[in-house]
Structure formats: C-alpha cells, structure tokens
Image (cartoon, grey):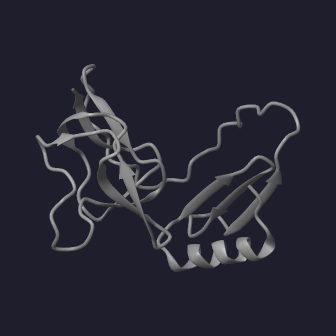
Amino acid sequence: MQLDHNQLRDLIALLGESDIQELKLEGDDFRLELRRNLPGVQPQVVMQAAPAVAPVAPAPVAAAPSAAPPAAPAVRGDLVEITAPMVATFYRSPAPGEAAFVELGARINVGQTVCILEAMKLMNELESEVSGEVVEILVENGTPVEFGQVLMRVKPA
C-alpha cells in the first residue's frame, strides 16, 4: 500500500471533519498514527518506515485517560463474537427509520450484512463470518465503537 502526500493531506482533512480521535494505519512499508484532542497531549502526526526485518511487538504505551468501551458481559464458550474491525460509529439499519439488519433471535448466514460501521463519512457494511442465531446485540444504535469491541454474539448453526 502506497500513501503519497496528497492522500495523506486528504486523510488528515477527513479526520478533522470527523469525530475520530485516533487513527492507526499500517502498510507494508509504513506505519501512520494520527491523534487529536487527547487530554494533555499535543496533536501529532507520526509516520515511520517499517522495519526491513520481521516486525517486533511494539512497546506498551501508557494510555491517556479516556472513556473505555463498555465491558462486554461474560462470554459463553458456545457463542461466536462479531467484533468491530475499526474505530467507527455503529448503525443497526441502512438508514434512519428503516428496519435493522438483524434482531435478537434472527438467523444469519455467512456474508449477510449485520450492521454498518461509519468511519470518516464512509459507510462500511459488516458481514457475518458465521451462520447461526443472534443471541446478543451489545451496542446501541449510533454509538461509537472501538477496534475489537464485541458488537454481537451468535450461536453457530
């Protein structure tokens, strides 16, 4: 993945128009981190070249105090979690006033859209990777979600 100066400028402009506070993007030959409005931290843009050797786990970074995503209830071993692949805003339906993609107890199939995640004014449909019954929906419509946050739990068919 290549990222030129114009694309970087456009990405920063889009970030400025959104409510996203932090963005991390990695390619084969670069790592980009954008942060803004973090308490006690000056806005910064960090772009580093990726190492030529195998990647090493990054050193732990002290997290700035912020509202953590709501803790998900205890997991049953027979359920599969559908998680957010990005920081975004969670929407249950394709548009306001329309029916939700899935409801509690609904049967879903692999590849079926279960929600929309809006990031930087782009609507990303999240498709299920499992067939089964939706037994938990853990996020309210219109709520910001974090990367890896559990959105739904499905009992596999």
Residue sitting nearer the eye, 147 or 132? 132
Percent position of residue 140, x then y: 23, 57
From the viewer's perspective, is 52 left or right of 138? right
Residue sitting nearer the eye, 1 or 149? 1
Classify residue 105 by image quadrant.
Answer: top left
* Quarter of the rendering occupied by the N terminus: bottom right
Does 135 appear above or below 67? Answer: above
Residue occupying the point 15% across, 64% down: 99
Classify residue 53 by image quadrant.
Answer: top right
Percent position of residue 85, x then y: 47, 48
Percent position of residue 67, x then y: 40, 55
Does 97 appear above or below 83? Answer: below
Residue occupying the point 17% across, 69% down: 98
From the viewer's perspective, is 47 left or right of 140? right
Residue occupying the point 65% across, 54% down: 25
Percent position of residue 107, x then y: 16, 39
Residue occupying the point 40% across, 49% down: 68
In the rendered image, the residue lying farthest to the left is 105
